[in-house]
Image: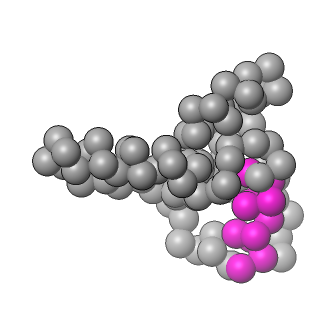
Amino acid sequence: MPDFSLELPVDFADYEWEVEAKGWFSQARINVSGKRYPLNFYDPARLAQAINDELERGRVFFEPNLVIVQSITRANMEQAVALLMESGELINMVEE
């Protein structure tokens, strides 16, 4: 398995509580062997809301590199990235 890291904004700890409350975060990146992949994290409730909002507007919902976690915390995002790497799902992601 190649080396990887989850990149979050330097000041993420200052507003992690706010991100968790919103249930959505798109400023994370996974760095693998010098390649960067943007990640779009949602919790299940926020995802359902986002999907419904788009459908009610007559649109479709689409997010590249969508990752669903129970809640948007550093620990959950780190665990999700580790699971993505272990499962080989990186090949399905869109590079930056």
Depth check, front residue: 90 or 13: 13
Query: Which residues are the magenta region?
Result: 77-87
Q: How is the image coloured?
A: one colour
Residue 74 lies, in percent from the top left, at: 79, 43
Magenta stretch holds residue 86: yes
- Residue sitting farthest toward the bottom: 87
For residue 53, which quarter of the picture? top left
- Residue sitting farthest toward the front: 45
- Residue 45 left/right relative to 6: left
Magenta stretch holds residue 62: no
**Quarter occupied by the N terminus:** bottom right
Please name the residue shown 19% across and 45% down the image. Answer: 56
Please name the residue shown 26% across and 45% down the image. Answer: 54
Depth check, front residue: 66 or 35: 66
Please name the residue shown 56% across and 40% down the image. Answer: 24
- Residue 44 left/right relative to 16: left
Please name the residue shown 63% across and 70% down the image. Answer: 90
Residue 46 lies, in percent from the top left, at: 49, 44
- Residue 47 left/right relative to 58: right
Q: Name the chief secondary structure element in magenta.
A: helix
Whether residue 10 is visible, yes or no, is: no
Whether residue 91 is visible, yes or no, is: yes
Residue 31 lies, in percent from the top left, at: 73, 53
